[in-house]
Amino acid sequence: MKKILFLHGFFATGSCPMARALKEAFEGTAVVLTPDLPLHPKEALKEIRSIIDREQPDLLLGNSCGSFLAQMLAPVVSIPALLGNPYFMMTEFLKERIGEHEYKAPRRDGFQDGRAFARTIRQGCGVGILKP
């Protein structure tokens, strides 16, 4: 069965409405992986790369910030990416979101509050790609 790796947006989770809708839409035809990604882009890329190495998905499907991450990894791992509602100017996007936030859907680890720091923006938006 084919595997789709869904990459959610900033302060969304692997249980957000889009993740649930994808799982339902592809039930019986594809496995939809919907991890909770770290906020920091470098940590998120490392986690995504680990999932790719372990699960070998056939497609990366990103939404918003998840599209930003998918478009960086797709050419490195040779997996096609479908980018929904892509947002590529992440530095500008994140500057307006410095501070405390609550995740938009429950996380599997139970952690519901997050904080976007200015250093996350400085460090994260110049992220390097994790090559094999």
Image (cartoon, rainbow, N blue to C red):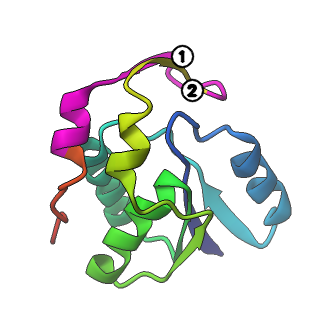
Mark 2 to mark 1: distance in Å?
Answer: 7 Å
Which amino acid, by three-letter code, is at mark 2? Arg
The residue sitting at 58% across, 37% down in the picture is: 12
Report which residue position mark 2 lands on: 107
| Secondary structure of the residue carrying numbered label 2 | loop
The tag earlier along the polypeptide, 2 or 1, is 2
Circle on res. 112: 1
**55 or 48: nearer the eye?**
48
Residue 53 appears left or right of 28: left
Question: What residue is drawn where x is 43% and y is 19%?
Answer: 114
Q: Which residues are magenta?
A: 104-123
Quadrant (top left, top right, bottom left, bottom right) of the C terminus: bottom left
Q: Is residue 80 above or below residue 27?
A: below
Image: 85 above or below 93: below
Q: Which mark is residue 81?
A: none
- Would residue 109 appear left or right of 18 to someone viewing this image? left
